[in-house]
Image (cartoon, rainbow, N blue to C red):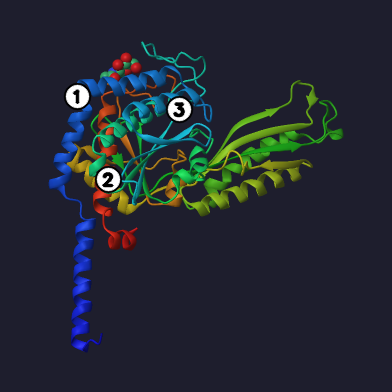
Amino acid sequence: MRLSRRRFLFLVFAVALLHSSLRASATHLKPEVIGPLGQRLLEDAKAPEFFNWVRNIRRKIHEYPELGFQEYKTSEVIRAELDKLGVEYTWPVAETGVVATIGSGEQPFFALRADMDALPIQELVDWDHRSKIAGKMHACGHDSHVAMLLGAARLLQARRHELKGTVKLVFQPGEEGFAGAYHMLKHSALDNIKAAFALHVYPSYPVGVVASRPGPVLAGAGRFTATIKGTGGHAATPQLSKDPILAASMAVVALQQIVSRETDPLESRVVTIGYIIGGKADNVIPESVKIGGTYRSLSSQGLVDTKERIKQVIETQAGVHRCEAELDFMDETPLPYPVTENDEGLYEHAKTVAEIILGKPNMQVLPVTMGGEDFSFFTQKMPAVMFVIGSNNKTQTPPEHLHSPYFVIDEEALPIGAAFHAAVAISYLDRHGGGGVIERDEL
Ligand SMILES: *[C@@H]1O[C@H](CO)[C@@H](O)[C@H](O)[C@H]1NC(C)=O
């Protein structure tokens, strides 16, 4: 077919116009749709039967905390609930992990993620559902994360025929230092996911509030140990020894300069030594001393630079004192965590959803902290965003923070979290799903 130049230009113009209007309708979040949907999701999740169900799941998991990559019972509870809901899943993914699938089975795939592991902490809260396992506790709220995600599964399953794509519910092991997210992401069950969302309970905000921010929100974090070797001997003849206690002490002091003297004061980094192990007797110079710690930064380059300098400083200080240092940065296991960097577009999306369904004043700006989080492996690989959800329990003022043996939540946060998860996923699929051209173009 031959086209005249005018006709050709007209055709190009028409196609461009059609494309941009499709694009606009596909990317626009409609308050008139998400508003009523959000209200229904909240009502459903807050209904007494639903609330009791989600709360019981949380309590059950709270009573039987399991550490990273040992979440066998927790994984069993999750699968039993998914079975009851008639939701399909892949298991095991990275030992204890579960990836459930709800929706059309077609792209786009949107992931909602919850971590499952507890901490090696003895619970000191006196309540009916306290941990039944000595020395282990859900002090970081991962029991609540699992419950909220199962709540979302139930809400989504009831609407599965309306989903314009597929929601992947990711229950992952080993967030507390085991890089569980990294190991999950290697599995084919998480292939081709377009974007991911996660929620973390947060006792500094009241129930009903959520918070986040675009860009870096949590630090990248690595660990290290250094074994400083000298020559042991009698305390009375130091000239015959090479004292690793002194070398280690000087190294610890010298490490403080990395942040205070070598880092731009407007940049955030941390170097902390968490332990020094060495020597047994007051009249003996030991053979060696072991120190260990963590280094953190809000930028990948900051992490690389800090690590390099830690090595140089410790080795050099050891050398000054005629000792030798052996560094281990544990680059294989456990992996260092990258910076958690919230995607701007996805942040705007979830923020708008929060403002519509929870009210504008209940969407707040989360301050950056130097904590680490393995959801960072998601943020490295795809547009991903992490929000916190207010869980302040009014019986506790001021609130004990995450990882405290007195950590508590307000369980009224659970249905809100379930509804928020579901609303973010449904609206994401509404915006990005259901159109071949748009999907390929945008994602
Ligand atoms: C507040 O915390 C205590 C202790 O965990 C618990 O017994 C109580 O149920 C909590 N309140 C709510 C509303 O969840």
Asked if the beta carbon under badge 3 is closer than 8 A to the nearest atom of ligand 1, the reply is no
Residue shown at the point (37%, 28%) measured from the top left:
83
Q: Which residue is labeled 3 in the image?
A: 75
User: Is residue 24 shown above or below 243?
Assistant: below
> What residue does disc 2 label?
350
Residue type (three-letter) at the residue carrying disc 2:
Ala
Going 77% across and 40% down the picture, which residue do you hit?
323
Q: Nearer the viewer, mark 2 or mark 1?
A: 1
3D distance between C-alphas at marks 2 and 3: 28 Å
**Mark-to-mark CA distance, 2 and 1:** 24 Å
The image quadrant in which ligand 1 is located: top left
SS at badge 3: helix
Identify the mark nearer the N-term, 2 or 3: 3
**Is residue 264 found left or right of 326 in the rendered image?**
left
Residue 47: numbered disc:
1
Question: Is the Cβ of the residue at disc 3 closer than 8 Å to that at disc 1?
Answer: no
Please say if 442 is above or below 427.
below
Q: Which amino acid, mark 1? A: Ala
Q: Residue at x 76, y 32 (%)?
A: 288
- Amino acid type, callout 3: Ser
Front residue (pair 174, 90): 90
Percent across and percent down for residue 418 are 28, 32
128 is higher (above) or lower (below) than 315: above
Where does residue 138 sit, x and y in percent of width and height?
A: 43, 23
Q: Is residue 250 left or right of residue 416?
A: right
Q: Is residue 172 visible?
A: no
